[in-house]
Amino acid sequence: MTLPPSVRITEELSEYPILEIDHPAASGRIALNGAHVMEWIPEGHDPVLFMSMAAQLEPGKAIRGGIPVCWPWFGPHPRDTAMPAHGFVRTMMWKVDVARENDSEVEIVLKVQDSAETKTYWPHAFSARLHVRMGAFLEVTLQVANTGTAAWDMTGALHTYLNVEDVRQISVHGLHGTQYVESRLSPEKRPQHGPVVIDQEVDRLYASDAPVIVHDPAWKREFIIEKGGSLATVVWNPWIEKSKRLADLPDEAYPEFLCIEAANAGEDVVTVMPGQEHLLMQRIDVRKLHA
Ligand code: TA6
């Protein structure tokens, strides 16, 4: 495949191709392992996505940071604890389907489909494409199609790790009044009062299709996060104790990120009929705050 001028493919780590993007509007990196957007730096801004210094960049391993593609299930497998958390496509090697650019953005489409290996995890026929539009904004769309003869149910998420100065100082706006479940506590729903602040481990699933704004006063910027095809927004920070249990995250790194995930999860289970598809989209814009 001929890549456009702003895109090159590197393999500094053997068997681990990474698309390097260097465009006037933005730079970034996308690993073919998991179709994983690892980095996005819009022109004139600091990096928007968090990447753990201890991330394991090895084929078949999930990457701690960037935008993990969680599919065809979100979280632990609904029935079989032997199955990988967050599905299996984030540890598969995807292929480049489209790579093009214009004056304002680079567009990359990666693809993967069912195989004998995927059938050991999930007995269905599917094709999946991840569409990445990278420029002054970042728009990621997971397009999944049922290429089989029977309907299947799916859950999933674009599990985005956002770079923040100090998670203890940020606030998330747009979820006031929304019902949420805190997965660390009982499964009962509770209403969000005002902005979401992080002062403990937070692992919440909000029943929301609304945009959110992450306000980072210390870094003097805001992230405007819109989405499509999703009725669930997950907000996660592991805080102190859980961070210590994550081998691919330094213990002292938890203040540096917040996950805002466009999800199909909880009660938002999607049924895809044969020949049909589902699109899950997240768009991030960055705005500087003028103190
Ligand atoms: O999205 C929140 C969550 O489901 C948390 O419960 C935590 O497990 C996180 O995802 C990270 O999961 P991972 O499998 O990537 O370590």
Image (cartoon, helix red, strand yellow):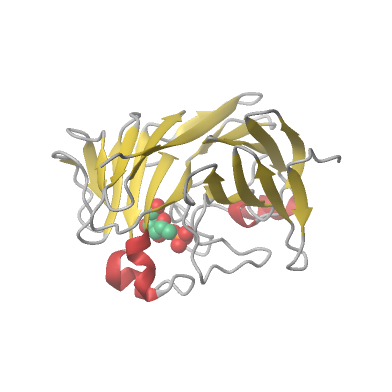
The one nearer the camera, 101 or 174, is 101
Q: Is residue 289 visible?
A: yes
Residue furthest to the right in view is 1
- Residue sitting nearer the eye, 1 or 24: 24
Q: Is residue 132 above or below residue 77?
A: above
The reply to whether residue 264 is visible in this rendering is no
Split into 4 quadrants, where in the image is the C terminus? top left
Residue at the image position 21 percent from the left and 50 percent from the top: 197
Horizontal and vertical percent for residue 186? Answer: 20, 54
The reply, left or right, for residue 177 in relation to residue 241 is: left
| 15 is higher (above) or lower (below) than 289 | below
Residue at left 53%, top 51%?
Answer: 68
- The residue located at (58%, 36%) in the rendering is 135
Q: Position of residue 289 (x, y in %)?
A: 31, 40
Quarter of the figure that contains the N terminus: top right
Q: Is residue 154 left or right of residue 164?
A: right
